[in-house]
Image (tube, rainbow, N blue to C red):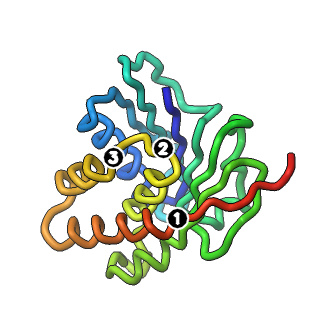
Amino acid sequence: MLEVRFHGRGGQGVVTMANLLGEAAAYDGLFSSAFPIYGAERRGAEIEAYCRISPSPIRVTSPITEPDVVVVIDPTIISVGNPFSGLKDSGMIVLNSPRPVELRWRTFVVDATSVASEHGLVRSGWPMVNVVMLGALVKAVGAVTLDSLERAVMEEFSGKVAEQNIKAMRVAYERTREVMKVAA
């Protein structure tokens, strides 16, 4: 079973991101479970969401405390929290960052903020990087196919918004790069 934990801020689409990954997994014939953890949420507050993907039914319903993958869509969270808590030694990180960040895990970076802005994915002044980052996640992990992810995006959004997100997701897939990890 693959366990992915997403970190972002309220209003950035973290919950939607986990749900889209789960839907894409279903289109690929896999089982999935996606859900958020809520507290006193408000726009800008730290948010976590989770997604489990497996070839067999998933019976676990608890939050993911020891993820295989951590996705950070807002890099400011690194300086105020510990999104890497519990990440397995063999785990990996997918990070929205304009520059490489060396960590002790396999790390993949993409400047999703720029990609979202380039494709007009800005809402209330915030670049919407959630779907963009899913392209990076698929490049890093390969848990689902881009085609299935596209299908999930088309189901969630419509018209121009869906098209912009799909184009940006594919650009992020191409621009995602692995960073050399530092020794533990």
- Say whether disc 3 or disc 1 marks the residue closer to the N-terminus: 3
Kindly give the residue lying farthest to the right in the view shown: 184
Q: Which mark is residue 16?
A: none
Contact (Cβ within 8 Å) of mark 3 with mark 1? no
- Packing grade of label 3 (10 A; few <14, some 14-19, many >=20) is some
Position in image of residue 85 (x %, y %): 71, 42
Position in image of residue 34 (x %, y %): 39, 36
**How far apart are the alpha carbons under marks 1 and 2?**
22 Å
Position in image of residue 59 (x %, y %): 42, 16
Kindly give the residue lying farthest to the left in the view shown: 159
**How far apart are the alpha carbons under marks 3 and 1?**
16 Å
- Packing grade of label 1 (10 A; few <14, some 14-19, many >=20) is many
Instruction: Check disc 1 and report its element: helix, strand or loop.
Output: loop
The three-letter code of the residue at mark 3 reads: Thr
- The residue identified by callout 2 is 49
- Say whether disc 1 or disc 2 marks the residue closer to the N-terminus: 2
- The residue identified by callout 3 is 145
Q: Which mark is residue 176?
A: 1
Where is 69 relative to 33, above or below? Answer: below
- Say whether disc 3 or disc 2 marks the residue closer to the N-terminus: 2
The three-letter code of the residue at mark 1 reads: Thr
**How far apart are the alpha carbons under marks 3 and 2?**
21 Å
The three-letter code of the residue at mark 2 reads: Ala
Q: Residue at x 32, y 37 (%)?
A: 25
- Packing grade of label 2 (10 A; few <14, some 14-19, many >=20) is many
Nearest to viewer (mark 3 / mark 2):
3
